[in-house]
Amino acid sequence: MTPVHFSFTSAFTLGLMGLAFHRTHLLSALLCLEGMMLSLFIALALWALQFESTMFSAAPMLLLAFSACEASAGLALLVATARTHGTDRLQNLNLLQC
């Protein structure tokens, strides 16, 4: 395994572990998701460079656009949650009530 592959694999794994173990605040969960998306972006960009084809070069940009949309939707949910509940702690949120 090359150092580049090890670095983006470990970045994805650390983001996944952060999402699994540190679920106290909504903002920390969103940051872990964003780190996972950025490591996937790096993996797709390296994959497109490895094949040296222009056909695969649009996939990382599409993923980056979806990642930006995910980040903006997550921040909108964070603001709405902070306004209604007064905090962004995930323990205070109940998914069964509006």
Image (cartoon, rainbow, N blue to C red):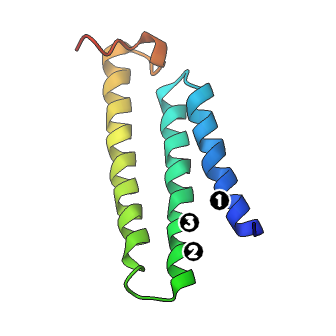
Q: At label 2, which amino acid type do we have?
A: Leu
* Relative side of 65 to 26, left or right: left
For the residues labelled 3 and 2, the Cα–Cα distance comes to 5 Å
Image coordinates of residue 94 in percent, x first then y, are 35, 12
Residue behind mark 1: 8
Q: Residues within 10 Å of mark 3 (few under 14, many from 20)?
A: some
Residue occupying the point 52% across, 73% down: 45
The answer to whether the residue labelled 2 contacts the one labelled 1, judged by CB atoms less than 8 Å apart, is: yes
Say whether marks 3 and 2 touch (CB < 8 Å).
yes
**Residue 68 x/y as whole percent:** 38, 55
**Quarter of the figure with the C terminus:** top left
Residue visible at 51% across and 89% down in the picture: 52
Instruction: Name the residue furthest left.
Output: 98
Q: Residues within 10 Å of mark 2 (few under 14, many from 20)?
A: some
| Residue corresponding to mark 2 | 46
Q: Quadrant of the N terminus?
A: bottom right
Could you tell me if the residues under marks 1 and 3 are in contact, i.e. CB atoms within 8 Å? yes
Q: Is residue 94 left or right of residue 46?
A: left
Closest to the observer, 66 or 85: 66
Q: Is residue 31 above or below residue 1?
A: above
Query: Where residue 43 is drawn, which disc sits there?
Result: 3
